[in-house]
Image (cartoon, helix red, strand yellow):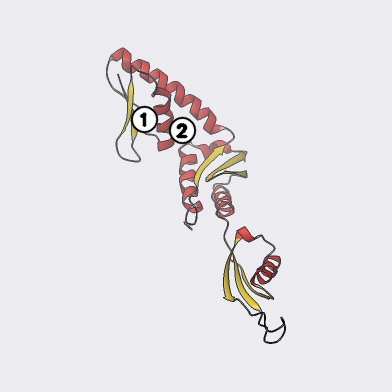
Amino acid sequence: MREVTATGQTVDEAVQSALEQLNTSRDQVQVTIIDEGKKGILGVFGAKRAIVKVTLANNPIQEAEKYIKGVVKNMNVDVNVTATVEDNHVTFDLSGEKIALLIGKRGQTLNALQYLTHLVVNKEGNKYHTVTIDAEGYRGRRKETLEGLALRMADKAKRMNKKVALEPMPAYERKIIHSVLQDKDDVSTYSDGVEPHRHVVIKP
């Protein structure tokens, strides 16, 4: 975290001077006013300059990007990371060779990295972000797979006329199953078990 103390005829002028020194914009810093200053008589006699301390805040998205790169480097995988922010949701897209290593079996490695990155992004607690980490379109392909699985297992539950329990999945994958089947009148779904073994149950 970098900070500078700056002075000016007014608080605004002092802040502007600090921003120029830090080469940043107002929304990236925290400002502490040390002295508001005084104009003095006729703007000259007894005038006192304003003093401010301006601190460059950590950018949680950049911190998270650096964290991802550090983790994958230790796995001997070279990736490009692209961050996209929409409101309070951040998506990190990873691309490069050996990407399958980062995905892991049924996305388990990617899910673990996503969970840890979520903690890194939100550690300051100033603003809450949700996080998705995708690797060369894996999330989209996994969503299609889960949607197909949901429909097949719903048919199986109806055919056998008994409950069908799916494998344990993270919350957002369970949500895909629930949403695919929510409009069906002949089956219902609920989640059962305790994390990390929580899973979807489909019943007629």
Q: Are marks 1 and 2 in contact (CB under 8 Å)?
A: yes
For badge 1, the amino acid type reads Glu
Q: Position of residue 20 (x, y in %)?
A: 71, 66
Tell me the quadrant of the picture where the N terminus can be found: bottom right
Label 2: which secondary element: helix
Question: Residue 108 vs residue 70: left or right?
Answer: left
Residue found at x 62% / y 39%: 95
**How busy is the neighbourhood of tag 1: few (under 14 within 10 Å), some, or many (20 plus)?**
few
Question: Residue 108 vs residue 52: left or right?
Answer: left
Q: Position of residue 21 (x, y in %)?
A: 70, 68
Give the alpha-carbon distance from disc 1 to disc 2, as whole Å.
Answer: 11 Å
Q: Which residue is mark 1?
A: 167
For badge 2, the amino acid type reads Arg
Task: Using the image as rendered, state which of residue 89 and residue 164 is in the foreground.
Answer: 89
**How busy is the neighbourhood of tag 2: few (under 14 within 10 Å), some, or many (20 plus)?**
few
Which circle's residue, 1 or 2, is located before the other in the chain?
2
Q: Which residue is mark 2?
A: 106
Q: Position of residue 175 (x, y in %)?
A: 41, 32
Residue found at x 63% / y 61%: 26
